[in-house]
Image (cartoon, rainbow, N blue to C red):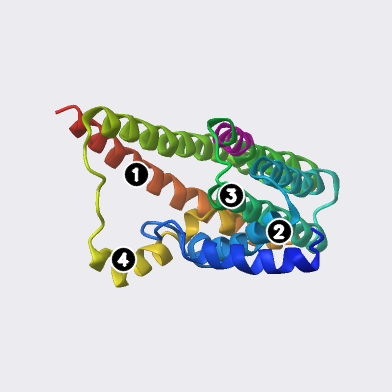
Amino acid sequence: MSISKGGQSKFVQVLHELEHAQKPGVGVPAYTRWINRRAARAFAAGAVASGLGPNTVSLLSACSSLVGLVLLVLLPASWGTGIATACFLALGYIMDSADGQVARVTGTGSPAGEWLDHVIDAVRTPALHLAVFTGFQRWFELDTALYFLPLAFALLAIGHFMSQILAEQLTRQHTLRAGSPDVKVHPQDQTLKSNLWSVLILPIDTGVMCWVFVFWGSPVAFIACYVFLFVFGLVFAGISAHRKYRQLGALAK
């Protein structure tokens, strides 16, 4: 992004606005909460100063992630390939958080833009694991069962993604129909408990999944991390799905 002198003052102005218009951090994993969102604020301010709209940022996010996945599939497994892949995926994740911030600060959010963002996420989520599956087939020598782990991870990831999106939409629709007040978070939950929870659920953080590819040059290290993230994600998704089902069931009473 190229920013003129006038754009630099715009950058500072927008960055200041974004710092005072952030989503709550309650329940958000640590990397996303304290690293990715901050980086996204800077990118969003630069995007606004450069005249980029939220949909453009969403498409740039998709392109960055795509480059990372193509590298993973086409280049032999190595430390260099892994680091490059991780950087492109992490950059894509920053922009994925920035598009919504651009929409909010410019007032250009729209149902079409939200739809585009969710569609990109719905494709990118399983595509990452399908790229790992292809990489395993091409570059790794593994036991047969491990070759298919990425397919299971893809199903888990997209299932959990849809569970979250649908629960949010169904809760929002019920709230609008019933005219119920928004749920308020107790101040205590926004401090120590919230911070501790953000750290505890770090293994489900999208940012962690991006950076785990720095170990792509060592099959043993990567597989160990990948298996751990899968098992943790499976347990978390099961608990989360049970909780959401109960919460949505309670709305009908």
Residue at numbered disc 1: 240
Give left or right: position of 62 versus 191: right
Decide which of tag 3 and tag 1 comes sooner along the chain. 3
Tell me if mark 1 has few (under 14), some (14-19) or many (20+) residues whose alpha carbon lies within 10 angstroms of its own. some
Frontmost residue, 155 versus 142: 155
Tag 1: amino acid: Ser
Q: Distance between the residues labelled 2 and 4?
A: 32 Å
Residue at numbered disc 3: 106
Tag 4: amino acid: Gln
Secondary structure under tag 1 reads helix
**The image quarter in which residue 217 lies:** bottom right
Task: Name the residue located 52 percent from the left edge and 40 percent from the top edge.
Answer: 157
Frontmost residue, 13 versus 251: 13
Tag 2: amino acid: Ala
Decide which of tag 2 and tag 3 comes sooner along the chain. 2
Tell me if mark 4 has few (under 14), some (14-19) or many (20+) residues whose alpha carbon lies within 10 angstroms of its own. some
Task: Name the residue located 25 percent from the left edge and 66 percent from the top edge.
Answer: 187
Q: Where is residue 209 in the image (x, y as percent from the top left)?
A: 59, 54
Main secondary structure of the magenta stretch: helix
Residue at numbered disc 2: 49
